[in-house]
Amino acid sequence: MGYAVGETLMDWNQRYEVDDTPWDKGVAHPVLLDMLTHGALAGRVLVLGCGTGHDVRELARRGLEVVGLDVASLALERALSHAPVGDETYQLGDLFHAPEHWRHHFDGVFEHTCFCAIEPARRPDYVAAVAEVLKPGGHLLAVFFVNPDNSGQGPPFGCTAGELDVLFGGKFRLREEHGDIPTYPERAGRELLRVYQRV
């Protein structure tokens, strides 16, 4: 995790400094491994809110060209402390200020900690930014937090399937949806996997 929240930047770096990073499970998201066996992502992939790079390394291990993006420099320092496993790189920054050369640059985007970390009011900006970095026909593989169980406080901020339908409906086509997914034990029944295709 690590992202711009509203117009201010939550100090995600400070969270790493004090080891307050409950989202970092030490391994890639279990559903990523499952989906990769079905060819859900290919080519050049961007991982949003990549943290210490577990998902990045899993994708690179499968032969994909991967860029991990995060706003926390300490998270990326820890990611870079791991020996490279393939064609992976890391970028300090946020999706709302993506480099110009990223326009229609990626075949796929993966995320499970970014959307839930931004203020809900900025979600339309998120959708527009993901659409901008994806090639037409590219795929977004995203795990959404539908029940973070934090009484509406966040981050993480929850969402509903209906809200996602409205947000993504203009620029993306829903290809797959799975509610019962492999995940970390404490998140069972609280996540929704969707695969979108950029139209």
Image (spheres, grey):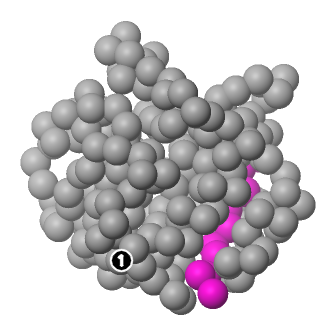
Specify start and end residues of the magenta stretch as a single range. 189-199
Q: Which residue: 84% across, 66% down?
A: 166
Q: Quadrant of residue 13?
A: top left
Q: Position of residue 87 (x, y in %)?
A: 17, 67
Residue at x 78% of width, y 74% of height? 169
Q: Is residue 118 above or below residue 177?
A: above
Q: Look at 35% across and 77% down and name the residue there.
A: 105
Under circle 1, the secondary element is loop
Report x, y in % for residue 161.
84, 59
Kindly identify the amino acid type of the residue bearing the numbered disc 1.
His
- At x 39%, y 57%, the residue is 98
In this rendering, is residue 82 above or below 126? above
Q: Is residue 169 left or right of residue 45?
A: right
Q: Which secondary structure is most common in the magenta stretch?
A: strand
**How far across and down, in percent of the image, does residue 11 sit?**
44, 21
Q: Is residue 62 magenta?
A: no
Q: Quadrant of residue 93?
A: top left
Check the image and name the residue furthest to the left. 83
Image quadrant for the C terminus? bottom right
User: How many circles with numbers are drawn on the protein?
Assistant: 1
Q: Residue furthest top?
A: 18
How crowded pointer 1 is (Cα within 10 Å; few <14, some 14-19, many 20+) is rated as some
Viewer-closest of 121 and 17: 121
Q: Write down the residue under mark 1.
A: 105
